[in-house]
Amino acid sequence: MRSAVENVSYPEVLETDWLVIGGGAAGIMAAVRARELAPTCRVMVLEKANVTRSGCLAAGINAINAYLNPGETAASFLQYVKKEFAQQVRDDLVLSLAERLNEMTDRLAAWGLPIYRDEQGRYRQRGRASIQINGEAIKPLMAAALEASGAEVRNHAVVTDLIVTDGRVAGALYFDLHTGQFTAVRAKAVLIATGGASGIYQPNTGGAARHKQWYSPFNAGSGWAMALRAGAELTSLEMRFIALRVAHTMAPTGTIAQGVKAKQINGDGVNYVPNYAYAQGKPTTAELLWATMEEEKAGRGPCALDTRGLTPEQGDLLAQAYLCMCPTQVLQWADAEQRPETAAVPITGSEPYLVGGHGTAGLWVDVHRQTTIAGLYGAGDAVGGAPKKYVTGSMAEGAIAAEHALDHFLREAAAPHPGWTEALEQAWRRARQPLNNDAGATARQVEEALQAVMEYHAGGRSGGYRYEQSGIERAQQSLAQLSKAGAALGATTPYELMRVHEVRDRLLVAAALLVHQSHRRESRLPLYQSRTDYPAPDPQLDRTWLNTRRSHGRADADEELKLEILERVWEEAVPREQASEEPVPEEQAPGESAVRGGISA
């Protein structure tokens, strides 16, 4: 039974140099790199769960999907990413991480990750940008490297707020998930590596199976919410990511599509992919999803990956690959008394997610991964503008952030923080406020109400992922009421307090998403960002990024926080005609910014 929070005392204040929020691939690499370059640097990692098995890599992976195989360059990787996302990527971010993909892969190998090799001793290529691994234990291996670095790790630490004084980040506030005790950490620089956001839309399955999702159901967008409250900018939330996945289990499809070259077929057994016209000749990841959903809409579903005809040995190898990352797929086959070589594997679209690893949503950063707040950095799934970075790209961003922070903040003497006491008091007051509320609606009830609003009015799966202005406005009206319900949520245990903050963070991120969806009046990416009232792309919005930030002041409660939209234009660093390459299928695998204008929303 979870213990009640009693006698919450004023936060203890700890000191560190490099504070890392989030113990995933990006956070771990950022901590390790800082300790490598400066062994006396004090590094603290705060993780909501336990770094050994937390986040997106908890169950493992079976491929490194961002790797420069022989013949590939950082420039060719950039061109592939740009084609996949209608040119709407940050060249500087993609290039800088691409240059370090192989370095990060070699690190994982040195940490003990089993990587298959070919007859020449090279990493075994699965696709143009990917290599095959046995990665069930990738997270424990990374956690072991983190421990060996000497960084301090605090597990079950739920961070609620950044502390910013005089325009510079000064630390963060968290509470212990077991005791409920609050602690403030004063730091010279802070990294947000908390991943993206799930749970904004209704999951494909409900009830007890509601967490059977492709993306980690525990990623609540909390890093983005605390960044918004602190004054940082988020970008491209409207460019959602929707995964084409195995139906029911939400297992990744690249394992089948690229591992055994299975074709996509409809309910009539027809390979439907060649029946559609694609913008660039060959379908992008988003277009493969679109074609599948068009087949379902036309009544020709269910669609599937045709694994019939595989040999029993190939079927066994496929099952082994899924044991490295999604064992429930193997359990589903066993439960249905099927094998992949005897029955096609059904596929469908997931619910929409907001992510910076597969998609472009996240923190707005410079090439050093510093946000618009001095000393505050982002990396991995939390950073926007550089999609398809996956594990190795996230690690690269963590290393880039650590290196810049060391050069500009971590080696300097501890600076005074004028206004620290007032900022900490405000953060603590907001964080503990649910403990003073009476019991009423539960966090789950408010969360499910949010998901219903977004599902039916803001481009959920039931509407074919498309939306229009009237629906967005209805969603905004409903969300205003839900935000009041979120502000009234009460908690009596540390776990309940965490859930209340997760729901409030999701409400804030959803509100920002709706502002983005309302403002981008075009359709740029099939289903990811598709409007029924503006069905075509607008050339005037090419290379235009929509950013959100709080419009003024610092709010005590999320419902008081007002958002505004900025349009930023980012020029290409590498012209698209250079190194023009064929797009790489999903899982096969420095410009100047100008503010065009602030528009209140």
Image (tube, rainbow, N blue to C red):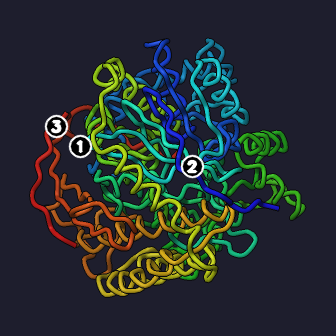
What's the residue at 67%, 72% (across, down)?
Answer: 205
Residue 83 appears in view: no
Q: Nearer the viewer, mark 3 or mark 2?
A: 2
Which is nearer the N-term, disc 1 or disc 2?
Answer: 1
| For the residues bearing labels 3 and 2, Cβ distance under 8 angstroms | no
Task: Give the secondary structure at mark 1.
Answer: loop
Residue 359 appears in view: yes
Find residue 591 and name its label: 3
Q: Residue 593 location in percent, x, y?
A: 15, 44
Q: Residues within 10 Å of mark 3 (few under 14, many from 20)?
A: some
Q: Nearer the viewer, mark 3 or mark 1?
A: 1
Q: Which residue is mark 2?
A: 182
Q: Quadrant of residue 59?
A: top right
What is the C-alpha distance between the residues marked 3 and 2? 41 Å
Q: Residue 343 location in percent, x, y?
A: 78, 61
Three-letter amino acid code of the residue under disc 2: Phe
What is the C-alpha distance between the residues marked 1 and 2? 23 Å
Q: Residue 98 location in percent, x, y?
A: 38, 29
Q: Quadrant of residue 271?
A: bottom right
Q: Is residue 126 above or below residue 167?
A: above
What is the C-alpha distance between the residues marked 3 and 1? 28 Å
Q: Is residue 227 above or below residue 468?
A: above
Q: Nearer the viewer, residue 380 or 325?
A: 380
Three-letter amino acid code of the residue under disc 3: Gly
Q: Which residue is mark 1?
A: 166
Three-letter amino acid code of the residue under disc 1: Asp
